[in-house]
Amino acid sequence: MDKAIKKSLQRYAQVFFDGRQRNINEADTVMYLTKFFTDVLGYDLFSDITKEFQVRERFCDIAVKVDGQVRFLVEAKATPLNLSDRHIEQAENYASRSGIQWVVLTNGLSWRLYHLTFESTGIEHDLAFDISFTPESEVEEVWKHLEILSRESI
């Protein structure tokens, strides 16, 4: 991991942590996440990220694209809100309606990546990773997981 990524991860860990302390709402969390995806994960704000991505009559918080194709959806929750298993249902709904197999569920401090399989009996979701991203987190360990979501990796 290079020094710039390490510094950015440390900075954003504090940003998300401070956001929890200030009780920021979901809209602000989405704004922070969008900036994180550009600054740390290497996406272009104008061509790779769509906020309020329309999936039929509903809207997913963020869609991340590479070469014009959506690679994964991001369902964001307000930073002060603890993630729960019921939150994946909303993300599954968006993904199944759009045929996208990868979904990130995050509040900035907790990150979960799911792979979805669409079957005739329903949707199966497999947890690829579940990490905590706080100022106390070991940034190398965090990066081992989040790097999977980077534009370079996709």
Image (cartoon, rainbow, N blue to C red):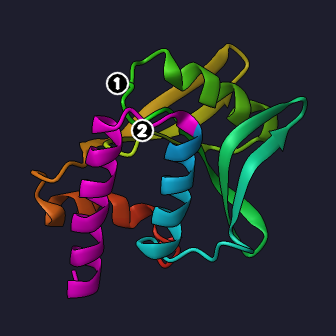
The amino acid type of the residue labelled 1 equals Asn
The amino acid type of the residue labelled 2 equals Asn
Residue in front for this viewpoint, 92 or 3: 3
Q: From where the camera sits, is residue 2 visible? A: no
Q: Residue at x 42, y 38 (%)?
A: 107
| Residue numbers of the magenta segment | 1-26
Label 1 Cα crowd, 10 Å radius (few <14 / some 14-19 / many 20+): few
On the image, which quarter does residue 144 sit in?
bottom left
Q: Residue at x 33, y 49 (%)?
A: 16
Q: From where the camera sits, is residue 92 visible? A: yes
For label 1, the SS is loop
**Residue 140 x/y as whole percent:** 16, 66
As drawn, is 148 to the left or to the right of 135?
Answer: right
For label 2, the SS is loop
Kindly identify which residue carries mark 1.
Answer: 82
Q: Give the alpha-carbon distance from disc 1 to disc 2, as whole Å.
A: 8 Å
Kindly identify which residue carries mark 2.
Answer: 107
Which callout, 1 or 2, points at the residue further toward the start of the chain?
Answer: 1
Q: Residue at x 35, y 60 (%)?
A: 146
**Residue 18 x/y as whole percent:** 28, 47
Please tell me whether the stretch drawn in magenta is mainly helix, strand or loop: helix
- Marks 1,2: beta carbons within 8 A: yes
Q: Is residue 25 magenta?
A: yes
